[in-house]
């Protein structure tokens, strides 16, 4: 029996596109700090909670792609994070801190309720 397209669409809507536990962690950190976060902040969270740094970055980029979080570049201008940006960053499956050199700006939730 073929799957109903409505069921497929419903499943895709309910399936998170990123790690929701990491989303909660960075969102809580943002709420506690009350300021935009940079690479050093995510590096510290990774060490503090014994989480792979690139897992946090993976979640962060996915949330930016979906419009849940935003990125402001080093010049202070909002910059879109695209699927292409994500694919370039994770071309080898994992990313390293040195791969993020051009991301010298700050990240923040798109809406205060995030």
Image (cartoon, rainbow, N blue to C red):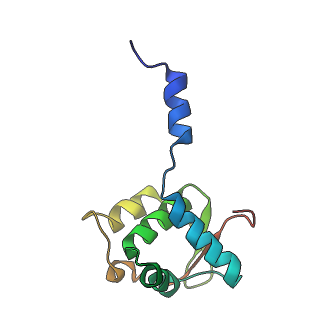
Q: Is residue 94 above or below residue 36?
A: above
Residue 31, visible in the rendered structure: yes
- State the residue in front, 46 or 97: 46
Quadrant where the N terminus is found in the figure:
top left
Task: State the image coordinates of residue 45 (x, y, percent, origin top left).
Answer: 49, 81
Q: In which quarter of the view is residue 10 placed?
A: top right
Q: In which quarter of the view is residue 57 placed?
A: bottom left
The structure residue drawn at horizontal position 58% and vertical position 85%, both measured from the top left corner, is 75
The structure residue drawn at horizontal position 46% and vertical position 78%, both measured from the top left corner, is 49
Q: In which quarter of the view is residue 63 placed?
A: bottom right
Task: State the image coordinates of residue 6 (x, y, percent, origin top left).
Answer: 55, 23
Q: Is residue 102 above or below residue 21?
A: below
Residue 103, visible in the rendered structure: no
Task: State the image coordinates of residue 105 (x, y, percent, origin top left).
Answer: 54, 82
The structure residue drawn at horizontal position 39% and vertical position 76%, both measured from the top left corner, is 53
User: Looking at the image, which residue sits at the far left?
Assistant: 92
């Amino acid at each position: 029996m073929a799957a109903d397209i409505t069921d497929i669409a419903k499943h895709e809507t309910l399936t998170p596109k990123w790690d929701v536990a990491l989303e909660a962690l960075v969102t809580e950190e943002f709420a506690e700090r009350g300021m935009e976060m940079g690479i050093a902040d995510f590096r510290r969270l990774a060490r503090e909670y014994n989480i792979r740094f690139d897992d946090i970055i993976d979640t962060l980029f996915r949330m930016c792609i979906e419009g849940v979080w935003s990125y402001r570049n080093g010049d202070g201008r909002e910059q879109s994070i695209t699927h292409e940006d994500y694919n370039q960053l994770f071309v080898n499956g994992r990313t390293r801190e040195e791969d993020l050199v051009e991301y010298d700006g700050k990240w923040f939730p798109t809406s205060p309720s995030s």
